[in-house]
Image: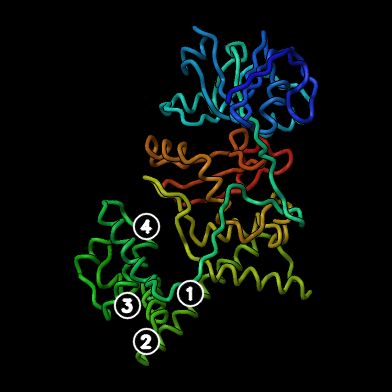
């Protein structure tokens, strides 16, 4: 059932009223218990919009005056969420005035081409004077924290999963990678290594030379690839297949070599941090914990698409040593840190990249040989924080980190 309540609005219509600069007419629409607010006025300003919809990030439909520049550019209306720079949001939260009449919007379900999407979200947006009225759905998007003050990632459904002894993960991965390759999508380097290694193990070291060549390897380069043979040995180990004495020796040597390669990169990063060695038990344990995390790391895809976004060991070490609070040492202690649990790092990065997946896709379609970068005033807003994102032309995530206090316009990579 639809019901309405109308009247002049000088205070916000929410549970905790707040003063507004202008007077608006408002209509509360209720479909059963579901509320919608229709707001109209002769003039609008950013302070009022922030209090009414921007601060809480309410999903809003902005309706434009007929014939106005915004109407001509975007159509009758745009639905989405107001996008503020970090500096703008901080100023409005401090009840300060921001020096612009433009409103930028993260559009929802809008069929805009890349130029209009960029214009609406990052460039001119629309002028306040073009706004006729707006309708919003109130909803609480306040970030949740646990008892330790650590933020929780929103909209995550966690389903406990038990290991199924009947599930053959090796053949499952082999099938996934083969289907991806057969679809015409080129496998990433670590996927090729995984596929060849699994196939060799499942077929007693036999593999079609045509497959090897198709994946960019020769017999010589295959035999030299430490990662391929690491996957080969690990697959045999998981499947409890017999090892020859020669294979046992080679696997043990390979594990030492790969572990040392990872440790070497980790030590180089610690040196760059100008950390001075400490013999305290706490820091010894911290270094061991960091070393374990790095040794356990496996590269993977973070965002699917025509240009898949992935991270590798270099990305992981760079991010973890600089921007995970519990692991910051030396000069890195002064860098910004993720306000989330370390175990949620991969999921957090996936969520942040998902906010700008369309921009990433457009960027690499139009300029495939150029680095993707969003930082400073274009930092990615997610769950109350702004993030800088850097992605190399091949899709490798080079860096991602939260913008710290006062860093709203910073363009320097951390």
Identify the residue shown where x is 73% and y is 60%.
330
Gap in Å between the C-alphas at discs 3 and 1?
19 Å
Identify the residue shown where x is 51% and y is 11%.
69
Report the side of 85 relative to 18 (left or right). Answer: left
Residue 100 horizontal/vertical position (percent): 66, 19
Q: How many marks?
A: 4
The disc, 2 or 4, on the residue closer to the chain's N-terminal end is 4
Q: Secondary structure at mark 4?
A: loop
Scheme of image coloration: rainbow
Q: Residue furthest bottom?
A: 245
Report the side of 212 relative to 248 (left or right). Answer: left
The disc, 2 or 3, on the residue closer to the chain's N-terminal end is 3
Q: Which residue is mark 2?
A: 247
Instruction: Classify 196 as above or below 38.
Output: below
Q: Residue furthest front?
A: 1
Residue 12 horizontal/vertical position (percent): 75, 23
The disc, 3 or 1, on the residue closer to the chain's N-terminal end is 3
Gap in Å between the C-alphas at discs 4 and 3?
20 Å
Gap in Å between the C-alphas at discs 2 and 1?
16 Å
Q: Locate the N terminus and report the quarter of the image it occupies.
A: top right
Q: Which residue is mark 4?
A: 188
Nearer the camera: disc 3 or disc 1: 3
Q: Secondary structure at mark 1?
A: helix
Gap in Å between the C-alphas at discs 1 and 4?
20 Å
Residue 139 horizontal/vertical position (percent): 65, 35
Identify the residue shown where x is 66% and y is 21%.
28
Q: Which residue is mark 1?
A: 258
Q: Tell me whether the residue at label 2 lies in contact with that at label 1, contact meaning CB atoms closer than 8 angstroms.
A: no
Residue 90 quadrant:
top right
The disc, 1 or 4, on the residue closer to the chain's N-terminal end is 4
Q: Which residue is mark 3?
A: 201
């Amino acid at each position: 059932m639809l019901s309405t309540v109308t009247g002049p609005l000088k205070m916000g219509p929410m549970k905790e009223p707040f003063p507004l600069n202008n007077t608006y007419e408002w209509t509360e629409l209720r479909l059963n218990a579901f509320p919608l607010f229709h707001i109209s006025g002769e003039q609008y300003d950013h302070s009022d919009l922030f209090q009414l919809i921007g601060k809480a990030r309410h999903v809003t439909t902005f309706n434009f005056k007929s014939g106005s520049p915004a109407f001509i550019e975007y159509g009758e209306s745009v639905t989405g969420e107001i996008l503020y720079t970090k500096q703008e949001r901080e100023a409005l939260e401090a009840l300060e005035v921001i020096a612009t009449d433009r409103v930028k919007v993260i559009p929802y379900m809008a069929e805009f081409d890349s130029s209009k999407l960029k214009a609406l979200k990052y460039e001119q947006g629309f002028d306040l004077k073009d706004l006729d009225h707006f309708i919003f759905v109130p909803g609480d998007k306040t970030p949740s924290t646990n008892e330790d003050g650590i933020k929780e990632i929103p909209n995550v459904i966690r389903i406990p999963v038990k290991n199924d002894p009947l599930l053959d993960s090796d053949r499952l991965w082999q099938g996934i990678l083969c289907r991806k390759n057969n679809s015409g999508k080129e496998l990433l380097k670590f996927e090729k290594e995984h596929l060849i290694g699994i196939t060799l193990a499942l077929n007693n070291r036999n593999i079609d030379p045509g497959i090897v060549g198709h994946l960019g390897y020769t017999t010589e380069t295959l035999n030299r690839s430490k990662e391929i043979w690491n996957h080969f040995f690990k697959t045999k180990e998981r499947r409890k297949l017999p090892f020859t004495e020669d294979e046992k020796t080679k696997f043990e040597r390979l594990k030492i070599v790969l572990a040392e390669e990872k440790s070497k990169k980790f030590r180089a990063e610690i040196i760059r941090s100008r950390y001075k060695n400490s013999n305290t038990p706490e820091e010894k344990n911290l270094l061991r914990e960091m070393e374990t995390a790095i040794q356990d790391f496996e590269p993977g895809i973070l965002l699917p698409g025509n240009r898949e976004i992935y991270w590798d060991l270099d990305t992981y070490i760079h991010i973890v040593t600089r921007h995970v609070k519990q692991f910051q040492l030396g000069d890195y202690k002064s860098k910004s840190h993720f306000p989330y649990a370390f175990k949620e790092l991969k999921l957090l990065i996936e969520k942040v990249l998902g906010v700008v997946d369309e921009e990433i896709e457009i960027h690499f379609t139009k300029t495939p040989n150029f680095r993707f970068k969003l930082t400073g005033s274009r930092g990615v807003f997610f769950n109350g924080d702004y993030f800088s994102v850097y992605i190399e032309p091949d899709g490798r995530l080079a860096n991602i980190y939260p913008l710290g206090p006062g860093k709203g316009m910073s363009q320097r990579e951390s």
